[in-house]
Amino acid sequence: MNGKNNIAIGFLTMGLFMAYGFLLIYLRDFAPGKEEWINSYSIGKHFESRLAHVHGNLFGFLNILIGYLLLHFRDKLKNVKTISWLAMAGLLMPIGIITEIYLGLPPALVLIGAIAMTASVIWLGFSFINLKLNNEK
């Protein structure tokens, strides 16, 4: 797994969180009690659900980008597999927000996912700083 799964899972994650966006539109515009939902814009479940939607799509996109870069540079970078796994573990953040909202679980997954995604992005950044291309000395 040198990036291919990041791309596939990234697209699937984006699709699921885009679909979740339709639920949020329904809650805002069509659901019974939509006024209460609108009035809680910056607090509670409304705010948390928007965080999950945004981070789910962002982290899905990051997995697509990271996966592409890992595939393209896999022979030139070190620790490709670890960076790949960390990026996918980052998806635990938006999943953790969802489990907090709907299942009342503690935010452990949110923290694990945030740390994993941050680590993968920083690690990949340093990997590219240290990358030697064919025309470099």
Image: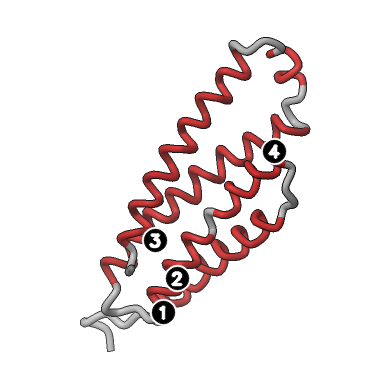
Secondary structure under badge 3? helix
Based on the displayed image, in which of its 4 quarters is residue 90 positioned? bottom right
Residue 20 pos. (x, y %): 52, 31
Secondary structure under badge 4? helix
State the separation of the CA atoms marked 2 and 4: 29 Å
Secondary structure under badge 1? loop
Q: Is residue 112 left or right of residue 126?
A: right
Residue 85 pos. (x, y %): 45, 67
Return the disc, 3 or 4, that comes first in the chain's sequence. 3
Which amino acid type corresponds to the residue marked 2 in the rendered image? Ile
Q: Which residue is mark 1?
A: 79
State the separation of the CA atoms marked 2 and 3: 8 Å
Secondary structure under badge 2? helix
Name the residue: 44% across, 54% down. 62
Name the residue: 28% across, 66% down. 71
Q: Are marks 2 and 3 in contact (CB under 8 Å)?
A: yes
Return the disc, 3 or 1, that comes first in the chain's sequence. 3
Which label number is shown at residue 66?
Answer: 3
Return the disc, 1 or 4, that comes first in the chain's sequence. 1
State the separation of the CA atoms marked 2 and 1: 6 Å
Q: Are marks 1 and 4 in contact (CB under 8 Å)?
A: no
Q: Are marks 2 and 4 in contact (CB under 8 Å)?
A: no
Return the disc, 2 or 4, that comes first in the chain's sequence. 2
Categorize mark 4 by other alpha carbons within 10 Å: few (<14), some (14-19), many (20+).
some
Categorize mark 1 by other alpha carbons within 10 Å: few (<14), some (14-19), many (20+).
few
State the separation of the CA atoms marked 3 and 1: 13 Å
Which amino acid type corresponds to the residue marked 4 in the rendered image? Ile
Residue 73 pos. (x, y %): 29, 72
Residue 51 pos. (x, y %): 63, 40
Q: Which residue is mark 2?
A: 83
Categorize mark 3 by other alpha carbons within 10 Å: few (<14), some (14-19), many (20+).
many
